[in-house]
Amino acid sequence: MSDKKIPYKIYLEESEMPKQWYNVRADMKKKPAPLLNPATKKPMTADELSHVFCDELVKQELNETDRYIDIPEEIQEFYKMYRPSPLVRAYCLEKKLDTPAKIYYKFEGNNTSGSHKLNSAIAQAYYAKKQGLKGVTTETGAGQWGTALSMACSYFDLDCKVYMVKCSYEQKPFRREVMRTYGADVTPSPSSTTEVGRKILAEFPDTNGSLGCAISEAVEAATSQEGYRYVLGSVLSQVLLHQSVIGMESKIAMDKYGIKPDIIIGCAGGGSNLGGLISPFMGEKLRGEKDYRFIAVEPASCPSLTRGVYVYDFCDTGKVCPLQKMYTLGSGFMPSANHAGGLRYHGMSSILSELYDEGLMEAVSAEQTSVFEAAQKFARVEGILPAPESSHAIKCAIDEAMKCKETGEEKTILFGLTGTGYFDMYAYGAYNDGNMSDYIPTDEELQKSFDTLPKVD
């Protein structure tokens, strides 16, 4: 099919929208290692996990056999308010780069949360409401997840308590206010409101916080209050399951026009956006039906895949969560206060970690000044101000497109544009003023963190 027949934006019809989530674990020959009880070092049971998570979400977390899981009708109806999201052909960027590459991006910013996070937030809130809970607790980095969850909880009349990474809480006051507008209680983390928060502050009094810290506080808040459960915006297998609607819509749209991507790129923090985008394509690769090149892009300041180790580690700084085998920098690693708030997590999804370890996926890291340079270039020609997290994928897509220019290859590139950057103007201001710096942890700093990893036989 010629390029002229492919519109700038490809939308699916309502009848074409996915009715099921895709569970990539069903097609993985080597499954991700199980979550372990931190006390016994044995696989977590459904009963143990149900003290922290909603019952139905526990079932999804442990499900490694069902390839497809039905999306409840009420969630499908909610999705229709902002889905399907457009698959966009970046004609203007291609022209600016003078590249023979064809560049597409799946844009997830068409909702008030400004990101893909609402895909899982509404599912988790739905199951909490169905279980008869009073409310949920969570953490948020850049604020997209906290915003999405506050919207979902408001829809189902649930209480929502959000622990926001301190540096993001201070840098993004308007993101905080959106959460509060939807009824959420927002606390900067680490805080003095929890036992684990007080402990972290005593050990790191000048810390800017981390997702690991915020997770610890949110879990403590959930487990110490009757009628509450903890929900997570990334990392967990249940989250990647819900986010598979991104990749499924992308694949349906591309198949509709006879487009096959050669390279699929996503930013990587905990793995929700990347995992959601690549899942159905990865399934084809795992089943031997088609081949793709997958690239995860992470910040050089928090490089879990490119410089981490593949071992069991705590999912949180306070060491109250289950142990997960993943690529990690150590649960005590405190990343610098960079502007990619949603990517400042010490570990990676167990699913993505296993795929990466098997060589089915690549990973690269990027320094934040080069990321903002790519973001600015994209914004000036494509008309969307991208979030700093998404801009990591943009940088990689531009790099790959320029390689095509050098070689003359007409490769097709797909990347995930997870959301907009309108609440990230503090970061854009730092870049525009020339005040942005690039911090990369030393081997010595990482080793100090690795030395604290738990011992698991």
Image (tube, rainbow, N blue to C red):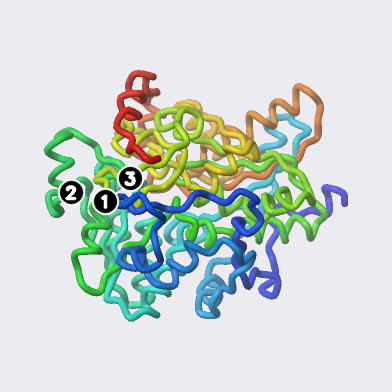
Query: Residue 200, percent across and down?
Result: 18, 41
Please, what secondary structure does the residue beneath circle 3 have? helix
Q: In this view, which residue lies farthest toward the right?
A: 1
Q: Are marks 1 and 3 in contact (CB under 8 Å)?
A: no
Q: Amino acid at mark 3?
A: Leu
Image spot of residue 5 (x, y percent): 83, 54
Mark 1: secondary structure: loop
Q: Please give the residue where the numbered disc 3 appears in the rendered image.
A: 211
Q: Which residue is mark 2?
A: 196
Q: Residue at x 67, y 31 (%)?
A: 400
Task: Reply above or below: 275 against 371.
Answer: below
In the picture, the disc for residue 320 is 1
Q: Which disc number belongs to residue 132?
A: none
Of the residues shown, which amino acid type is indicated by label 2? Val
Neighbours of disc 3 within 10 Å: few (<14), some (14-19), many (20+): many
Q: Residue at x 53, y 77 (%)?
A: 72
Q: CA distance from mark 1 to mark 2?
A: 9 Å
Q: Earlier in the sequence, mark 1 or mark 2?
A: 2
Percent position of residue 436, x then y: 37, 26
Q: Quadrant of residue 180?
A: bottom left
